[in-house]
């Protein structure tokens, strides 16, 4: 699961995960089997310990030859490494990417912005991100309505509507493992009048020149709260 990887097995996990992976498609089976087997063992042996975030070393990073997204759940702790499965385009701005975890949990990103999840609990069935994607692509401040259709945990769903504002905080430098990137830091604040629904506060660090969201902290649903997502290889 997305929340299980422990810092104590991080080096062995990534080394095993990457062994033999020579392409995005060719490494799919090994990636899934290795992660699933390793994480099951971690879950059984460390049930009483809070999972810790995995630190990717330069040596590990050098072995990554497939698109890989590190996900660090902010509330439950731990880390997982998601492989990109699909890229598709539709009539809306930006490309949609489907990233899959070791146990086939999925995160759907439109140009780095979460528009859906599967398998993480009370999933985001669908979400719009048009104004957010536009702001990240143009570098300009913006505002708009964001809606989320969220699973109630059974066969029903709830619709959440937010009034949001996103602002470009200017240039920053971030480090991903041992690589430095000059990015624009965007802060998105969303409020709602729906009783019991939380206000949302998302952060995006967008690489200048490429428009790639190198890092973000985004709300991914009421059951799990926020995930930090780091683009290791795209």
Image (cartoon, rainbow, N blue to C red):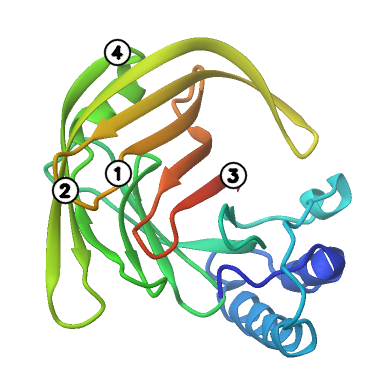
For marks 2 and 3 on the same chain, the one whose residue lies earlier in the sequence: 2
Left or right for 47, reference 192 = right
Q: Nearer the viewer, mark 2 or mark 3?
A: 3
Image disc number at residue 95: 1
For marks 1 and 3 on the same chain, the one whose residue lies earlier in the sequence: 1
Q: Residues within 10 Å of mark 2 (few under 14, many from 20)?
A: few
Visible residue check, residue 234? no
- Residues under labels 4 and 2: Cα distance? 24 Å
- Residues under labels 2 and 3: Cα distance? 25 Å
Q: Nearer the viewer, mark 1 or mark 4?
A: 4
**In x, y percent, where is residue 218?**
43, 44
Q: Which residue position is annotated with label 4? A: 141
Residues 89 and 92: in front is 92
For marks 1 and 4 on the same chain, the one whose residue lies earlier in the sequence: 1
- Kindly state the secondary structure of the residue where label 3 is placed: strand
Q: Nearer the viewer, mark 1 or mark 3?
A: 3
Q: Residues within 10 Å of mark 3 (few under 14, many from 20)?
A: many
Left or right for 137, reference 38 = left
Q: Do residues under tags 1 and 4 come within 8 Å of each other at their CB atoms?
A: no
Residue at horizontal 63%, vertical 75%?
31
For marks 4 and 2 on the same chain, the one whose residue lies earlier in the sequence: 2
Q: Nearer the viewer, mark 4 or mark 3?
A: 4
- Is the residue 62 above or below the residue 162 in the image? below
- Kindly state the secondary structure of the residue where label 1 is placed: loop
For marks 1 and 2 on the same chain, the one whose residue lies earlier in the sequence: 2
Q: Which residue position is annotated with label 3? A: 230
């Amino acid at each position: 699961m997305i929340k299980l990887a422990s810092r104590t097995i991080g080096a062995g996990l990534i080394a095993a995960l990457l062994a033999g992976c020579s392409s995005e498609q060719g490494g799919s089976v090994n990636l899934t089997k290795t992660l699933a087997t390793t994480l099951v063992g971690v879950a059984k042996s460390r049930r009483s310990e809070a999972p810790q975030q995995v630190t990717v070393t330069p040596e590990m990073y050098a072995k990554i030859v497939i698109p890989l997204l590190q996900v660090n759940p902010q509330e439950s702790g731990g880390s997982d490494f998601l492989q990109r499965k699909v890229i598709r385009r539709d009539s809306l701005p930006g490309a949609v990417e489907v990233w899959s975890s070791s146990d086939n949990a999925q995160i759907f990103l439109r140009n780095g912005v979460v528009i859906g999840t599967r398998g993480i609990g009370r999933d985001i069935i669908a979400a719009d991100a048009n104004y957010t994607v536009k702001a990240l692509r143009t570098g300009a401040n913006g505002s708009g309505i964001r809606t989320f259709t969220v699973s109630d945990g059974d066969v029903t769903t709830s619709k959440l509507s937010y009034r949001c504002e996103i602002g470009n905080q200017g240039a920053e430098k971030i480090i991903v493992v041992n690589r430095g990137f000059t990015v624009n830091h965007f802060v998105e604040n969303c409020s709602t009048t729906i009783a019991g629904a939380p206000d949302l506060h998302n952060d995006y660090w967008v690489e200048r020149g490429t428009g790639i969201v190198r890092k973000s902290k985004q709300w991914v649903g009421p059951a799990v709260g926020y995930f930090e997502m780091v683009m290791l290889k795209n």
